Amino acid sequence: MSIDPVKREKKSLDLLNVIPWNTGAVVVGGYSILGYDVSRYSDELDLVVPRGSSDELLKWFNYNGYLPVKTAVPNPQNYDGNFIRFSKDEVTVDLLIEAVRDRDAQVDIPASWITRSSIKKRIRGFNNSTSIDVPLARPNRSTSRMFLNKIGPHSENRMRDNTGRIL
Protein backbone atom coordinates (compact mmCIF):
# COMPACT_ATOMS: atom_id res chain seq x y z
CA MET A 1 0.00 0.00 0.00
CA SER A 2 1.51 3.33 -1.00
CA ILE A 3 1.17 6.40 1.17
CA ASP A 4 -0.39 9.50 -0.35
CA PRO A 5 2.34 12.19 -0.08
CA VAL A 6 -0.19 15.05 0.09
CA LYS A 7 -2.03 13.36 2.95
CA ARG A 8 1.25 12.63 4.79
CA GLU A 9 2.42 16.23 4.38
CA LYS A 10 -0.87 17.61 5.72
CA LYS A 11 -0.75 15.31 8.76
CA SER A 12 2.90 16.23 9.36
CA LEU A 13 2.18 19.96 9.19
CA ASP A 14 -0.88 19.53 11.43
CA LEU A 15 1.35 17.72 13.95
CA LEU A 16 3.78 20.66 13.93
CA ASN A 17 0.89 22.89 15.04
CA VAL A 18 0.40 20.96 18.29
CA ILE A 19 3.87 19.80 19.39
CA PRO A 20 4.80 21.36 22.76
CA TRP A 21 7.55 23.70 21.54
CA ASN A 22 8.30 24.80 25.11
CA THR A 23 10.43 21.62 25.30
CA GLY A 24 13.11 23.34 23.22
CA ALA A 25 12.59 21.10 20.19
CA VAL A 26 13.57 22.53 16.79
CA VAL A 27 12.62 21.32 13.30
CA VAL A 28 15.64 20.22 11.24
CA GLY A 29 15.96 18.44 7.91
CA GLY A 30 13.53 18.60 5.03
CA TYR A 31 10.67 20.27 6.86
CA SER A 32 12.95 23.06 8.10
CA ILE A 33 13.92 23.73 4.50
CA LEU A 34 10.24 24.10 3.60
CA GLY A 35 10.16 26.95 6.13
CA TYR A 36 12.46 28.91 3.83
CA ASP A 37 10.05 28.55 0.90
CA VAL A 38 12.19 25.99 -0.90
CA SER A 39 10.06 23.21 -2.34
CA ARG A 40 11.12 19.86 -0.98
CA TYR A 41 9.36 16.67 0.00
CA SER A 42 10.39 14.72 3.08
CA ASP A 43 9.24 11.33 4.31
CA GLU A 44 9.59 12.22 7.99
CA LEU A 45 9.74 15.04 10.48
CA ASP A 46 13.14 15.53 12.09
CA LEU A 47 13.21 17.25 15.48
CA VAL A 48 16.26 17.92 17.63
CA VAL A 49 15.75 18.38 21.36
CA PRO A 50 18.10 19.04 24.27
CA ARG A 51 18.61 15.97 26.46
CA GLY A 52 16.99 17.65 29.49
CA SER A 53 13.71 18.08 27.61
CA SER A 54 13.62 14.77 25.77
CA ASP A 55 11.65 12.85 28.43
CA GLU A 56 8.78 15.33 28.31
CA LEU A 57 8.59 15.13 24.52
CA LEU A 58 8.82 11.31 24.58
CA LYS A 59 5.85 11.18 26.95
CA TRP A 60 3.92 13.61 24.75
CA PHE A 61 4.41 11.49 21.62
CA ASN A 62 3.45 8.30 23.48
CA TYR A 63 0.36 9.97 25.01
CA ASN A 64 -0.73 11.10 21.53
CA GLY A 65 -0.49 7.61 20.04
CA TYR A 66 2.90 7.81 18.32
CA LEU A 67 4.60 4.46 18.76
CA PRO A 68 8.35 3.88 18.79
CA VAL A 69 9.68 2.10 15.70
CA LYS A 70 12.67 -0.24 15.91
CA THR A 71 15.69 1.02 13.98
CA ALA A 72 19.30 -0.02 13.57
CA VAL A 73 21.60 1.10 16.40
CA PRO A 74 24.02 2.62 15.99
CA ASN A 75 22.46 4.52 13.14
CA PRO A 76 25.18 5.88 10.83
CA GLN A 77 22.96 8.87 10.05
CA ASN A 78 22.71 9.90 13.68
CA TYR A 79 25.87 9.17 15.69
CA ASP A 80 25.42 6.59 18.49
CA GLY A 81 21.69 5.97 18.27
CA ASN A 82 20.55 8.89 20.44
CA PHE A 83 17.33 9.16 18.52
CA ILE A 84 13.89 7.64 18.64
CA ARG A 85 11.68 7.13 15.62
CA PHE A 86 7.92 7.40 16.17
CA SER A 87 5.13 6.57 13.77
CA LYS A 88 1.37 7.06 13.64
CA ASP A 89 -0.75 6.67 10.53
CA GLU A 90 1.33 8.10 7.66
CA VAL A 91 3.55 10.30 9.86
CA THR A 92 7.06 9.35 10.95
CA VAL A 93 8.98 11.51 13.41
CA ASP A 94 12.69 11.19 14.17
CA LEU A 95 13.45 12.69 17.57
CA LEU A 96 17.17 13.47 17.66
CA ILE A 97 18.34 13.81 21.24
CA GLU A 98 21.18 16.21 22.03
CA ALA A 99 22.74 16.39 18.53
CA VAL A 100 22.29 16.07 14.79
CA ARG A 101 24.74 14.19 12.59
CA ASP A 102 26.04 16.05 9.54
CA ARG A 103 26.19 13.05 7.21
CA ASP A 104 28.71 14.58 4.83
CA ALA A 105 31.15 15.92 7.41
CA GLN A 106 30.50 13.02 9.84
CA VAL A 107 30.33 15.38 12.81
CA ASP A 108 27.67 15.90 15.45
CA ILE A 109 26.11 19.35 15.69
CA PRO A 110 25.01 19.92 19.32
CA ALA A 111 21.34 20.62 20.00
CA SER A 112 22.39 23.65 22.05
CA TRP A 113 23.94 25.23 18.96
CA ILE A 114 20.89 24.50 16.80
CA THR A 115 18.33 25.67 19.35
CA ARG A 116 20.29 28.84 20.19
CA SER A 117 20.28 29.98 16.57
CA SER A 118 16.78 28.78 15.60
CA ILE A 119 14.11 31.10 14.25
CA LYS A 120 10.32 30.79 14.20
CA LYS A 121 8.55 30.65 10.85
CA ARG A 122 5.52 29.09 9.24
CA ILE A 123 6.18 26.08 7.09
CA ARG A 124 4.51 25.99 3.69
CA GLY A 125 4.31 22.63 1.99
CA PHE A 126 3.04 21.86 -1.48
CA ASN A 127 -0.65 22.07 -0.52
CA ASN A 128 -0.76 22.95 3.18
CA SER A 129 1.01 25.00 5.81
CA THR A 130 1.35 25.26 9.56
CA SER A 131 -1.04 27.65 11.26
CA ILE A 132 1.65 28.78 13.72
CA ASP A 133 5.29 29.77 13.55
CA VAL A 134 7.44 26.80 14.54
CA PRO A 135 11.12 26.82 15.57
CA LEU A 136 13.35 25.99 12.60
CA ALA A 137 17.05 25.35 12.33
CA ARG A 138 18.83 28.12 10.47
CA PRO A 139 20.50 27.10 7.23
CA ASN A 140 24.14 26.16 7.60
CA ARG A 141 26.75 24.76 5.29
CA SER A 142 25.33 21.24 5.52
CA THR A 143 21.82 22.34 4.50
CA SER A 144 22.93 25.02 2.04
CA ARG A 145 23.55 22.42 -0.67
CA MET A 146 19.82 21.63 -0.65
CA PHE A 147 19.01 25.33 -1.01
CA LEU A 148 21.50 25.91 -3.80
CA ASN A 149 20.15 22.95 -5.73
CA LYS A 150 16.80 24.74 -5.74
CA ILE A 151 17.76 28.41 -6.19
CA GLY A 152 21.03 28.11 -8.13
CA PRO A 153 24.54 29.22 -7.14
CA HIS A 154 24.28 32.59 -8.93
CA SER A 155 20.90 33.60 -7.56
CA GLU A 156 20.44 36.99 -5.92
CA ASN A 157 18.76 35.07 -3.10
CA ARG A 158 21.84 33.09 -2.11
CA MET A 159 21.81 31.83 1.46
CA ARG A 160 24.06 33.33 4.12
CA ASP A 161 25.38 31.73 7.26
CA ASN A 162 24.76 33.26 10.70
CA THR A 163 27.72 35.65 10.27
CA GLY A 164 26.37 37.04 6.97
CA ARG A 165 28.83 35.24 4.70
CA ILE A 166 27.41 33.88 1.45
CA LEU A 167 27.31 30.10 1.53
Image: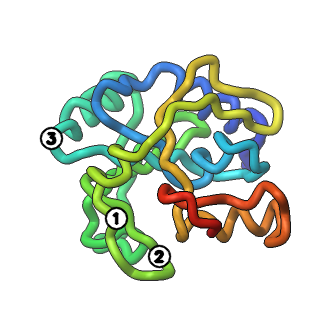
Q: Mark 2 or mark 3, which is nearer the start of the sequence?
A: 3
* Mark 3 or 1: the one toward you: 1
* Disc 3 target residue: 52
Viewer-nearest residue: 30 or 86: 30
Residue 72, position as x, y percentages in the image: 35, 70
Cα gap from disc 3 to disc 1, whole angstroms: 17 Å
Left/right of residue 104 with respect to residue 117 in the rendered view: right
Above or below residue 167? Residue 84 is above
Q: Mark 1 or mark 3, which is nearer the start of the sequence?
A: 3
Q: Identify the residue at horizontal 31%, vertical 56% (top origin).
A: 83
Q: Identify the residue at horizontal 64%, vertical 50% (top origin).
A: 33
Name the amino acid type tagged 2.
Arg
Tag shown at residue 103: 2
Q: How is the image coloured?
A: rainbow
Pick out the residue farthest to the bottom.
105
Viewer-nearest residue: 4 or 146: 146
Above or below residue 72? Residue 92 is above
Left/right of residue 50 with respect to residue 35 in the rendered view: left
* Disc 1 target residue: 109
Q: Identify the residue at horizontal 31%, vertical 35% (top origin).
A: 24
Pick out the residue farthest to the left.
52
Near mark 1 (Cα within 10 A), the count class, few <14, some 14-19 or many ≥20, is: few
* Mark 3 touches mark 2? (CB < 8 Å): no
Q: Identify the residue at horizontal 65%, vertical 34% (top origin).
A: 123
Residue 56, position as x, y percentages in the image: 22, 30
Q: Quadrant of residue 80?
A: bottom left
Above or below residue 12? Residue 157 is below
Tag shown at residue 68: none
Cα gap from disc 3 to disc 2, whole angstroms: 25 Å
Near mark 2 (Cα within 10 A), the count class, few <14, some 14-19 or many ≥20, is: few
Cα gap from disc 1 to disc 2, whole angstroms: 11 Å
